[in-house]
């Protein structure tokens, strides 16, 4: 199971690690949660009141503090058990954070992203600037140095499983490496005013030669 | 919170003041909104009258013992056996106030550490003014203590002298602060003059408001002492107010170095 | 219907009822705004309302539901029940208690009144991020922000007074023999709520006051370079523990109801108390998971990730203890129990998806999307709202002296359960849709399908609540008379009549070592009691004890 409706497409190199991380969380949650749920259903069915069933001996009585029930040993066992479940997912998260954190040590194309009410501007190293369209070559590490001209925005690229808060006064850096050509929609993902819903960008991943033709010869 | 031991003529378990004070405060905000809409000040002034009147009414009701709370005799109170109800209430309130100032100082430090530039110590805020204010507040805790020791020895007069001196010193603090602010404004350094200004005026203003509330409290206790409500046997509320006053002083001891000496 | 009585009362039971009524009024407003948003997003490219009004609805819906619907609901129960549960006759500072309520109510009215001012209500999202929240970028929304924050300031005053009141009451006014460990779990969960409220509302206060200062006094805390992150930190240092503030009382209701209706003592009461304390402390140090993509350092993010995951451990243990309570029980499926049992699987889903959100890596793909909205509605609606509604049913006979209709109650439950799942589950499946979008393109066919399904669920949910209101009103007016202990509960509120007398206990309850209640006499005159804290010795005479009748 994946978390988006078009994930039969693998678009970037980050997709696989994030999808597999999601799977780990998903299966842990399903097995642990599902197990608890089934146990719960069983209890509810098995211990329901049937007419004629005797009232338990320690049933609550008005004005009587109920006796303590259960052992603290059980508490520790549960705590330990849950803790053990969290170790693999914590390790997996840390590994994935490390992967996402730094771009791989290869040739990269650094693009300055600036969000403003209500569009995105992309500035390339050679000075070319585009509004609302981001063209990138396939198979190259793209580094987005992102900021905002006015309020707090967020560039959300769903198909890339990536987003970055664009905050005025600071520059946040994310990277991706696309491995499939196509045209993808990016949205603003932090409410920024009345135009927030319509603040979009199109990301066009092109074959390197096509991109070079566009980039090298100006736009 | 009644210090009075005279008979409660017809104490009630009802009180009009909670809703009056709340309504007053709501009207203050609507009054501000009305003013911003250009409708003028009448609503705001009416609101302030209701609010202040409500607070005074509440205090009067307390002082005259016209309200009765159900008191329970001691039951299970571990681990708070030695704390009275009022003392516990005051300390819980102070815990919240400590959070408030702690956060505020934290905000000041966070902004300062992240700022590109900041005026050097002594260039904008006069260290000598700050030192004088510090001295006045510290002295005011001494005079308050003198008042408490006096009443513990049975001297109501000593208490009144101590409280009046405390009030004068506290008022002196506020006067110097206002003069300082006035001087800064006249040099063009006001609330909109950047981050150093924002943190300075807001933090010292918040603190000054607490001092002002303390001065109102001092007036309340001076009145109470004159009326004979504070005695050698019964002065717990006075002590608790003293805890508040000292807390306000301690907060200043954090603000002074951060705002003036750093 | 004595108006003067209701306006001047300081009695904890009256104030409890006032809070609950206010909760339903304000909850109806919040719910109505939710319905408006749902209607607008049912189909793609609708324009039933403007983008501006949508943003206002989003923001006010969030603020009202979190601050002005759940809080009065649990404060109402706390006011009504806690003094009775610990064996005393009112709160420590009754006038401050009344002031808490009126401050709270008027604060809500001040905030909501912004709808009628130019520019409308606050439109920044309930998170009020900087620098959108500054005069520079929201000049047209001035009244919304100023009045919204002012209303929140009044709420903070109300909560601060309430915290002082309840802490003092629980510390100081328990009946003899009612030790901390003997108190019902509802009180313990509420103590955790109080501790967190004491910590976080001053934080919101600093944030709100500095923001108001930016608007009214011309300072520039939030327009400055670090303003955005400053606000984010302050808001989430408040905002994350706040969600536990609203969660704990509901769990307290679960603890009571699940024990009474399975006819067995709660499993692991001391384990649960330990978990409450641990999770309270942990809740204060996990706020970073709301800021994973803001550009903060990786080390901080990993710490916050791990800590957030770990906080599920105490909550997981609490839920497992609840389920263990059912073991060898004799479960009755009355309406309160239906609600409480119903929320267990839903809370499991909500909590499990929360673990996904705790991962700093996964967050890059789901933060701020419909997955997040689905997650928190799966925690808020079941574990917060449905549990408290279960509490309404549970304590309805006690508060009104009448019994509600079980048939209508069950209908309400099933409509709510089905409606809620149908409304919110589809949102997990559209996790690449951002939040707070007034509409979406017709090319997004999956989004459209899920939203349509969700709207059907919302209608069912609404129907359920209408039935609830009908049940409450008709049963409240002419339901059959209720016994003092219709459910066989154990805590002290079930030992008095339904509804209880004005000062609850006619004789003072005393809890023996073995945990049984006995009664003694209250002193007949007030004159010798000091008002400054009860330093007199107890004058209860052994010969005054009377055995309670079995």
Image (cartoon, helix red, strand yellow):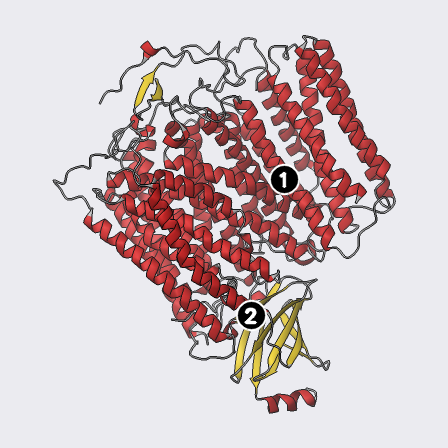
**Left/right of residue C93 with respect to residue C214 in the rendered view:** left
The chain holding disc 2 is: A
Q: Is residue C151 visible?
A: no
Q: Is residue A175 above or below residue C306?
A: below
Quarter-wise, where is residue A114 in the image? bottom right
Instruction: Quadrant for the C terminus of chain C, please.
Output: top left
**Pointer 2 with pointer 1, Cβ within 8 A:** no
Q: Residue at x 53, y 85 (%)?
A: A181
Instruction: Quadrant for the N terminus of chain C, please.
Output: top left
* Numbered mark located on residue A219 in the image: none
Q: CA distance from mark 2 to mark 1?
A: 38 Å
Q: Residues within 10 Å of mark 2 (few under 14, many from 20)?
A: some
Q: Position of residue C202 (x, y in %)?
A: 59, 41
**Left/right of residue B142 with respect to residue C34 in the rendered view:** right
**How many numbered marks are there?**
2
The one of C11 and C271 positioned closer to us in this rendering: C271
Q: Is residue B18 above or below residue C448?
A: above
Q: Position of residue B96 (x, y in %)?
A: 59, 36
**Left/right of residue C412 with respect to residue C101 in the rendered view:** left
Q: Is residue A120 above or below residue C405?
A: below
Q: Position of residue A211 (x, y in %)?
A: 62, 88
Q: Residues within 10 Å of mark 1 (few under 14, many from 20)?
A: many
Q: Which residue is denoted by mark 1 in the rendering? A: B100
SS state under label 2 = helix
Q: Is residue C376 above or below residue B224?
A: below
Q: Residue at x 29, y 28 (%)?
A: A64
Q: Position of residue A138 (x, y in %)?
A: 57, 84
* Pair 2/1: label in front: 2
* Numbered mark located on residue A100 in the image: 2
Which residue ends up furthest to the left in the rendered image?
A: A52
The chain holding disc 1 is: B
Q: Do marks 2 and 1 share a chain?
A: no
């Amino acid at each position: 199971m994946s978390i988006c409706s078009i994930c039969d497409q693998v678009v970037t190199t980050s997709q696989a690690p994030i999808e597999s991380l999601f799977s780990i969380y998903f299966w842990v949650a399903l097995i642990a949660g599902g197990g608890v749920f089934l146990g719960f259903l069983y209890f509810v069915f098995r211990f329901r009141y049937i007419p004629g069933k005797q009232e338990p001996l320690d049933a609550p009585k008005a004005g009587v503090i109920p006796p303590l029930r259960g052992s603290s040993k059980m508490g520790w066992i549960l705590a330990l058990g849950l803790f053990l479940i969290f170790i693999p997912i914590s390790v997996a998260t840390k590994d994935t954070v490390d992967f996402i954190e730094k771009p791989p040590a290869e040739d990269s194309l650094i693009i300055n992203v600036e969000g403003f009410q209500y569009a995105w501007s992309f500035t390339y190293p050679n000075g070319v600037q585009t509004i609302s369209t981001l063209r990138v070559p396939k198979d190259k590490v793209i580094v987005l140095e992102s900021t905002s001209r006015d309020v707090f925005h967020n560039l959300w690229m769903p198909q890339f499983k990536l987003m970055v808060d664009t905050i005025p006064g600071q520059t946040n850096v994310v990277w991706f490496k696309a491995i499939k050509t196509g045209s993808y929609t990016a949205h603003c993902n932090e409410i920024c005013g009345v135009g927030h819903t319509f603040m979009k960008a199109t990301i066009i991943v092109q074959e390197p030669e096509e991109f070079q033709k566009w980039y090298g010869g100006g736009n | 919170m009644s210090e009075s031991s005279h008979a409660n003529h017809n104490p009630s378990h009802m009180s009009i003041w909670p809703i009056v004070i709340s309504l007053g405060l709501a009207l203050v905000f609507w009054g501000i909104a009305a003013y911003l809409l250009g409708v003028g000040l009448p609503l705001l002034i009416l609101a302030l009258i209701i609010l202040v009147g409500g607070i005074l009414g509440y205090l009067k009701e307390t002082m005259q013992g016209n309200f009765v709370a159900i008191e329970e005799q001691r039951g299970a109170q571990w681990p708070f056996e030695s704390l009275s109800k009022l003392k516990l209430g005051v300390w819980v309130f102070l815990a919240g106030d400590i959070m408030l100032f702690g956060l505020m100082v934290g905000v000041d430090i966070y902004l300062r550490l992240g700022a590109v530039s900041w005026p050097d110590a002594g260039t904008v805020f006069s260290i000598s003014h700050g030192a004088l204010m510090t001295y006045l507040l510290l002295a005011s805790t001494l005079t308050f203590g003198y008042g408490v020791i006096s009443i513990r020895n049975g001297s109501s007069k000593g208490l009144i002298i101590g409280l009046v001196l405390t009030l004068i010193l506290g008022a002196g603090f506020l006067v110097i602060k206002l003069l300082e602010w006035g001087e800064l404004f006249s040099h063009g350094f006001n609330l909109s003059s950047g981050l150093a200004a924002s943190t300075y005026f807001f933090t010292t203003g918040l603190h000054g408001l607490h001092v002002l509330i303390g001065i109102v409290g001092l007036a309340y206790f001076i009145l109470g002492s004159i009326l004979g409500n504070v005695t050698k046997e019964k002065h717990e509320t006075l002590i608790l107010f003293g805890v508040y006053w000292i807390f306000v002083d301690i907060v200043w001891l954090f603000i002074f170095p951060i705002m003036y000496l750093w | 219907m004595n108006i003067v009585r209701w306006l001047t009362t300081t009695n904890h039971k009256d104030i409890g009822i006032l809070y609950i009524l206010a909760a339903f009024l304000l909850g109806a407003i919040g719910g109505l705004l939710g319905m408006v948003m749902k209607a607008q997003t049912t189909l793609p490219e609708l324009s039933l309302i403007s983008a501006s009004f949508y943003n206002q609805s989003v923001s006010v819906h969030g603020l009202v539901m979190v601050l002005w619907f759940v809080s009065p609901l649990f404060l109402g129960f706390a006011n009504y029940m806690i003094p009775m549960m610990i064996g005393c006759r009112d709160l420590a500072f009754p006038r401050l208690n009344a002031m808490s309520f009126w401050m709270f109510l008027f604060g809500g009215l001040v905030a909501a009144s912004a709808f009628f001012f130019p520019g409308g209500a606050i439109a920044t999202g309930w998170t009020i991020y900087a620098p959108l929240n500054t005069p520079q970028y929201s000049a047209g929304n001035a009244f919304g922000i100023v009045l919204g924050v002012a209303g929140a300031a009044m709420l903070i005053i109300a909560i601060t007074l309430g915290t002082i009141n309840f802490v003092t009451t629980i510390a100081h006014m328990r009946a003899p023999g009612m030790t901390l460990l003997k108190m019902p779990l509802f009180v313990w969960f509420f103590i955790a709520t109080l501790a967190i409220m004491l910590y976080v509302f001053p934080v919101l206060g600093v944030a709100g006051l500095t923001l108001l200062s930016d608007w009214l006094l011309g300072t520039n805390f939030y327009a400055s370079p670090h303003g955005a992150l400053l606000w984010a930190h302050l808001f989430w240092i408040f905002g994350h523990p706040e969600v536990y503030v609203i969660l704990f009382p509901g769990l307290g209701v679960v603890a009571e109801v699940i024990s009474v209706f399975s006819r067995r003592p709660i499993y692991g009461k001391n384990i649960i108390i330990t978990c409450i304390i641990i999770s309270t402390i942990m809740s204060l140090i996990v706020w970073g998971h709301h800021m994973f993509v803001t550009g903060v350092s990786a080390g901080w993010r990993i710490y916050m990730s791990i800590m957030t995951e770990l906080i599920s451990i105490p909550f997981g243990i609490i839920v497992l203890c609840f389920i263990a309570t059912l073991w060898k029980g004799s479960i009755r499926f009355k309406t309160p129990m239906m609600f409480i049992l119903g929320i267990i699987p839903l809370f499991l889903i909500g909590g499990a998806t929360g673990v996904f959100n705790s991962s700093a890596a996964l967050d890059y793909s789901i933060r701020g999307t419909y997955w997040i909205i689905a997650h928190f509605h799966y925690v808020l609606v079941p574990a917060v709202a449905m549990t408290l509604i279960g509490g309404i049913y549970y304590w309805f006979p006690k508060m009104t002296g009448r019994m509600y209709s079980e048939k209508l109650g069950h209908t309400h439950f099933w409509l709510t359960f089905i409606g809620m799942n149908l409304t919110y589950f589809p949102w997990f499946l559209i996790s690449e849709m951002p939040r707070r979008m007034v509409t979406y393109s017709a090319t997004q066919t999956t989004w459209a399908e899920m939203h349509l399904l969700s709207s059907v669920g919302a209608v069912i949910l609404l129907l359920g609540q209408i039935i609830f209101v009908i049940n409450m009103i008709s049963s409240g007016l002419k339901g059959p008379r209720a016994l003092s202990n219709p459910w066989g509960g154990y805590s002290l509120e079930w030992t008095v009549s339904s509804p209880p007398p004005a000062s609850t206990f006619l004789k003072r309850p005393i809890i023996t070592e073995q945990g049984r209640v006995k009664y003694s006499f209250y002193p007949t005159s007030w004159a010798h009691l000091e008002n400054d804290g009860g330093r007199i010795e107890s004058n209860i005479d052994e010969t005054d004890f009377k055995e309670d009748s079995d």
